[in-house]
Image (cartoon, rainbow, N blue to C red):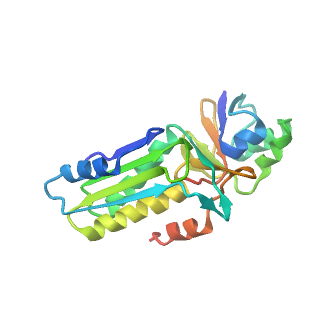
Amino acid sequence: MIEVVFFASVREALGKDRMQMDPGDIDTVEDLLARLIREEDSPGREVLSGENLLVAVNQTMVEPTHPVASGDEVAIFPPVTGG
Amino acid sequence: MESPRILVQEAPFDAGTEIRHLGAASGQTGAITSFVGLVRDINENDQVAGLYLEHYPGMTEKQITEIVDEAAGRWRILAATVIHRVGQLYPSEEIVFVGMASEHRGDAFQACEFVMDYLKTRATFWKKERTPDGERWLTTRQTDLDAAKTWQR
């Protein structure tokens, strides 16, 4: 299984902070996002199509083409505002 | 550089204590620089009643460590401390402390500013402001992105 975690406004829009996904035919981050957009039924799901979305796999920032496999933790979040 | 002191915590910190700690790390230290960031009471012309800071436990600490390691690679740093608070904060409260100890002030000043600029644009924290009109998540400021760019080589 792939562990997917959400933060900040993404978490609020989807109404949950984490979920698990069966890897199925997911090869990359892009595939994972596409499946989420197709299958999520929360009203805030358009946040997943946002152009400023950031993704990390196993706590390292990645590009959408990055591979994803079972056992990975994929985090999806908006641009950061720390400091 | 000795192992950096990096903390992400709800509890407040004491900048004076942290500066003394940095000074004690090495007998070669000639300069200590520091930065403290506070919660402002006005943002974009709105009164700020409170600020909630969310983070990604594990990744946030890892990133701050990477940022400090990058600074130590560019400048001669003897000791470094980064403390970033999370949770519910209020105007005038201290949010973040960055401190650097070096033999000379040039490296200490530059490393401190570099770490702050990268903290603003890379570290996985998110701020949610509470104003009289409601709550809003902040977005990355262009000025912060521009500042971070100036360090690119």
- Residue under the point 40% across and 52% down: B97
Work out whether residue A61 or residue B77 is closer to the camera in this orientation and state it.
Answer: B77
Relative height, residue A67 to residue B153 (above, below) = above
Work out whether residue A5 or residue B93 is closer to the camera in this orientation and state it.
Answer: B93
- Relative horizontal placement of residue B125, taking residue A21 as reference (left or right): left
Work out whether residue A62 or residue A45 is closer to the camera in this orientation and state it.
Answer: A45
Relative height, residue B153 to residue B96 (above, below) = below
- Relative horizontal placement of residue B34, taking residue B62 as reference (left or right): left
- Residue under the point 66% across and 31% down: A2
Residue B135 visible (yes or no): yes
- Residue under the point 47% across and 48% down: B63
Work out whether residue B139 or residue A1 is closer to the camera in this orientation and state it.
Answer: B139
Which residue is farthest left?
Answer: B27
- Relative horizontal placement of residue B101, taking residue A50 as reference (left or right): left
Q: Which quarter of the rendering shows the C terminus of chain B?
A: bottom left
Residue B140 placement (x, y as % from top left): 62, 60
Residue B136 placement (x, y as % from top left): 71, 51
- Relative horizontal placement of residue B123, taking residue A47 as reference (left or right): left
- Residue under the point 68% across and 60% down: B46
Residue A28, quarter of picture? top right
How many marks overall?
Answer: 0
Residue B121, quarter of picture? bottom right
Residue B35 placement (x, y as % from top left): 39, 59
Residue B1 visible (yes or no): no
Relative height, residue A76 to residue B43 (above, below) = above
Residue A57 placement (x, y as % from top left): 59, 42
